[in-house]
Image (tube, rainbow, N blue to C red):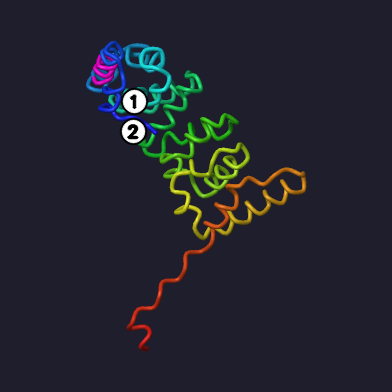
Amino acid sequence: MLTSRKELDDLLGGAARAWLDEALAEAAHAAAHPGTDSGNPPWELRFASAGRHCGLEHADSVRALLLVEARPALPAVTRLYEQGTAAERRAVLLTLHRLDLGATALPLVEDALRTNDTRLVAAAVGPYGAAHLDAHGWRHAVLKCLFTEVPVQALDRLAERARGDAELARMLGDFATERTAAGRPVPAGLRTVLELTAPAPAPAPTSTEEAR
């Protein structure tokens, strides 16, 4: 879970708070003057060094604040993801839903889902992935979580997207059969998702309908 700026101010020491103030000021300047920095603007360098200055436990939250403040266009977001470490990529994925990118950053989610890095997979199935993955991509994201043992609770809007999805239920059944045939355990989360694929119950009849 990402930490707010106010919470970070309470958690960080004086030097780290001062560093964060400067970093956010640089990000705000970049947002107000797009295209004025050649190469990597200063805030992007801060993005990479967030863990060193603010602590690894706060790095995701600091990087998310920088992204939101800088309001980068897709090319900059893509550059941060592609050139970043796994931790930096995770921060990008966790923040996508807070940026005004529409579905244009979906290739980053798809890239993360092709990896076996559980940190990236879990971040990829957060709010942005849930909002923009199509039905086919989302079903395979569910299976990816089960295969890599990412808890299904990481899947944002799981109940909403799984409800009544007969194709997902079939895929889950096939996955369970394959695992059993190979002598491998079926992930506990599979039953949870399978139960969610049941169609929504029909609404109870109103008193007017009952009277007819």
> Which secondary structure dominates the residues rendered in magenta?
helix
Which secondary structure, mark 1? Answer: helix
Q: Residue furthest bottom?
A: 212
Q: Is residue 27 magenta?
A: yes
Q: Quadrant of the N terminus?
A: top left
If you read the primary sequence from the N terminus, does the residue marked by circle 1 or circle 2 appear first? 1
Q: Which residues are magenta?
A: 20-28
Residue 52 image point, x, y percent: 41, 12
The residue lying at 41 percent from left, 35 percent from top is 104
Q: Residues within 10 Å of mark 1 (few under 14, many from 20)?
A: many
Question: Which of these two is toward me, 198 or 33?
Answer: 198
Which label number is shown at residue 208?
none
Q: Which residue is mark 1?
A: 67
Left or right of residue 117: residue 50? left
Q: Image height check: is 148 above or below 212?
A: above
Above or below, 167 relative to 182: below
**Amino acid type shown at disc 1:** Leu
At 43% from the left and 19% from the top, the residue drawn is 56
Q: Secondary structure at mark 2?
A: loop
Q: Using a 10 Å C-alpha cutoff, classify the residue at mark 2 as few (fewer than 14 neighbours), some (14 to 19) or many (20 or more).
A: many
